[in-house]
């Protein structure tokens, strides 16, 4: 059996679920998991369905055959082969906790992606990346060469056929043009103190103010700095007895976890853009367990 998924977004109306289910039955497909959400505020319907097929219909055939159903409801839809791993480019600067976490999860099979390149504006992690047999590209960025540097970055992305860029603490602001070109395909991570604590030492500022919750936010990148649609967030408690160094350590842990969960949701097509927000369907039962955890 081949495992597929279909994602659907369209204006809300009656009969959508029945039409999709009937299409699956007519094409000898067995539905294994389904999530849906009807947003009364935007009038939009979102659905993700996993299903099996015994090989009688391939991906192209299923996609072409769905046209009539899709046109009836004005659907945006995509069929995916769930065995095909998404190609990802990771970008990093000098904080390596998220990069190292992603490399570990990738290596043990907990994050089923194909890391096709790592790009950095420094050489700090060249050896780590190369030792994983992943291409490493050092592209320096200055105010004077930024357009040229971004052209180099996009060349790496396009040559590698990457579907997603992950900013694993990449400390350069991307241009509006790049954000638009890769809309919905760049994921960023940052601490959740914004806009209160800005600058190079937000955890020190949080310590000095006696903050009791440390959090992280992962979101899609847009031209509005750190204000893109949120995919995943989490927090961890701290107390007066902990030091500024503890804040940094705990902050790095939660950042790494939140980023990994956001990527996991995106690569499984569980995230839908809904205006300035996202619809994020929960992982199906057993989806984490089915990926080799080492």
Image (cartoon, helix red, strand yellow):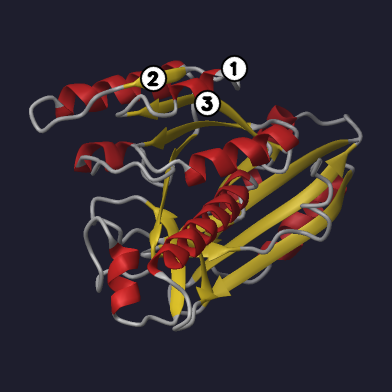
Q: Is residue 67 visible?
A: no
The Cα–Cα distance between marks 2 and 3, rounded to whole angstroms, is 13 Å
Q: Which residue is mark 2?
A: 137
CB atoms of marks 1 and 2 within 8 Å: no
Task: Say which residue appears at 55% left-offset and 69% top-offset.
Answer: 12
Q: Earlier in the sequence, mark 2 or mark 3?
A: 3
Q: Earlier in the sequence, mark 3 or mark 1?
A: 3
Which of the numbered marks, if any, corresponds to residue 133? 1
| Left or right: 269, with 255 as reference point | right
Dot 2: few (<14), some (14–19), or many (≥20) neighbours within 10 Å? some
User: Is residue 45 positioned above or below 90 on the image?
Assistant: below
Dot 3: few (<14), some (14–19), or many (≥20) neighbours within 10 Å? some
Q: Which residue is mark 3?
A: 128
User: Which secondary structure lies at badge 2?
Assistant: strand
Instruction: Name the foreground residue: 125 vs 260.
Output: 125
Instruction: Indicate the quadrant where residue 4 lies.
Output: top right
Instruction: Indicate the quadrant where residue 170 lies.
Output: top left
């Amino acid at each position: 059996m081949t495992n597929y998924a279909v994602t659907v977004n369209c204006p809300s109306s009656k009969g959508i679920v029945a039409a999709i289910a009937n299409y699956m039955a007519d094409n000898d497909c067995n539905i294994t998991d389904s999530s849906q959400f009807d947003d009364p505020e935007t009038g939009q319907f979102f659905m993700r369905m996993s299903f099996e097929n015994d090989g009688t219909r391939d991906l192209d055939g299923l996609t072409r055959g769905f046209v009539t159903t899709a046109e009836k409801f004005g659907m945006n839809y995509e069929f995916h082969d769930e065995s095909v791993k998404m190609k990802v480019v990771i970008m990093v600067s000098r904080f390596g906790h998220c990069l190292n976490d992603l490399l570990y999860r990738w290596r043990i099979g907990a994050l089923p992606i194909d890391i096709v390149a790592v790009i950095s504006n420094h050489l700090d992690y060249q050896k780590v990346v190369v030792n994983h047999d992943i291409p490493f590209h050092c592209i320096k960025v200055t105010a004077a060469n930024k357009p040229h540097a971004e052209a180099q970055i996009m060349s790496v992305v396009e040559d590698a056929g990457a579907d997603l860029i992950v900013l694993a603490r990449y400390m350069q602001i991307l241009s509006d043009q790049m954000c638009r070109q890769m809309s919905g395909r760049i994921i960023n991570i940052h601490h959740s103190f914004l806009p209160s604590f800005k600058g190079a030492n937000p955890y020190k500022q949080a310590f000095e103010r006696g903050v009791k919750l440390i959090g992280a936010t992962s979101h899609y990148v847009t031209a509005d700095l750190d204000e893109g649609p949120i995919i995943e967030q989490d927090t961890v408690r701290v107390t007066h007895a902990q030091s500024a160094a503890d804040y940094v350590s705990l902050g790095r842990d939660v950042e790494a976890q939140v980023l990994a969960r956001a990527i996991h949701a995106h690569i499984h097509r569980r995230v839908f853009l809904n205006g300035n927000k996202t619809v994020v369907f929960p992982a199906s039962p057993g989806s984490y367990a089915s990926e080799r955890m080492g």
